[in-house]
Amino acid sequence: MEGLYIVRSPKQFEKEVDFYLKHFNPITLDKLVDYIYNGVPIHKPSFLLSFDDGLRGIHDYVLPILQRKGLEAMLFVNPAFIGNQDMMFRLKAALIANELKKPKNKELKYVAKYVYDIKYEHAEHLNELAVQLNIDFKNYLDRHKPYLDLDQLKQLQSNGFHIGGHTHTHPELRHLPLVEQVSETLSSMNWVKQNLNPKHQIFSFPFTDYGIEKEFYTRTEKQIDLYFGGAGLKTESNPKHLQRIPIENLKDAKTMTYFQYIYWLLKMPFGKNNITRK
Ligand SMILES: [Zn+2]
């Protein structure tokens, strides 16, 4: 979707994977868990791919490439969107913005960029705008099927993908009260457990883990083995919370365009950028 994800071609994605394979050692989630929980050392600089949001491109384009290379990966999903029952509010905003940019809406063109400022808490405005502009989200979901369905998730799982939660509806957690942060999170964890029963319980924060407090971990850690953020090469005071390097917004010679959310997790000599939480 234009304006929302930077899109890579499968060819470019494969090139990037080859680049990482050349310089880093692919690591399994088992090994990573062993390292965190049992201190089993990882000797070489390593990487593990992960993908957020549960988009269908992971099944259609990423899976064949990773299968060919014998790589495993992590995939974090929002159960509210699985099977294309609904879409993330940001995708709604992108559809509205694209509509506003059409020549027939010439006089509205300038408000297009403000649509992206609408936050999760006010997402109902997006539904109202869509009605005004004759955009049918349901119809878009049926025609384009941007998200994976449960069968595809199962197929991914049996081919080396570790599926985890990414909250139920993809809110920006720090803007929610703690009780809702926890229920959004655990609802996605429970869905994954019930439908896919994965070996490791993994979770990634939607948007950012900025502003998440210690109490959040206390209330969720029974159901989560590892937490993943996207703040780059930083270490967390909670050893079960790992940061990933977001590469989906990079646009240079090595990282150009088709597909959506890729994160690289690199085991490297981390710097002193420690994140402490109150
Ligand atoms: Zn996300």
Image (tube, rainbow, N blue to C red):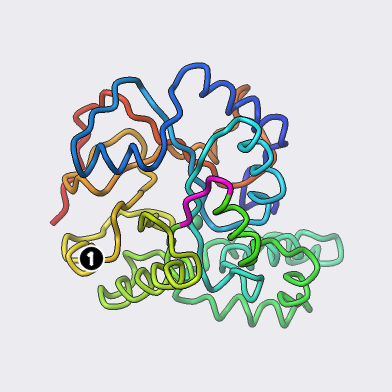
Compared to residue 97, the image places residue 159 above or below, namely: above
Answer yes or no: disc 1 within 8 Å of ligand 1. Answer: no
Q: Secondary structure at mark 1?
A: loop
| Quadrant of res 44 | top left
Seen at 66% across and 71% down, the residue is 84
Q: Which image quarter holds the N terminus?
A: bottom right
Seen at 37% across and 55% down, the residue is 202
Estimate the x, y position of residue 74 in percent, counting from the top left: 47, 47
Q: Which residue is mark 1?
A: 222
Seen at 72% across and 77% down, the residue is 138
Judged from this view, the residue extending furthest toward the left is 278
Compared to residue 223, the image places residue 156 above or below, namely: above
Estimate the x, y position of residue 145 in percent, counting from the top left: 73, 64
Q: Would residue 41 appear left or right of 117 to someone viewing this image?
A: left
- Which of 1/129 is in front? 1
- Which of 81/153 is in front? 153
| Quadrant of res 209 | bottom left
Q: Is residue 117 magenta?
A: no
Judged from this view, the residue extending furthest toward the right is 104
Estimate the x, y position of residue 89 in percent, counting from the top left: 56, 68
Q: Main secondary structure of the magenta part?
A: strand
Q: Would residue 227 appear left or right of 109 to someone viewing this image?
A: left
Compared to residue 157, the image places residue 11 above or below, namely: above
Give the residue type that dot 1 points to: Lys
- Which of 196/60 is in front? 196
Disc 1 crowd, CA 10 A, few/some/many (<14, 14-19, 20+): few
- Which of 149/170 is in front? 149
Q: Would residue 41 appear left or right of 7 to someone viewing this image?
A: left
| Quadrant of res 278 | bottom left
Judged from this view, the residue extending furthest toward the top is 22
Q: Is residue 162 magenta?
A: yes
**First to last magenta residue range:** 159-163
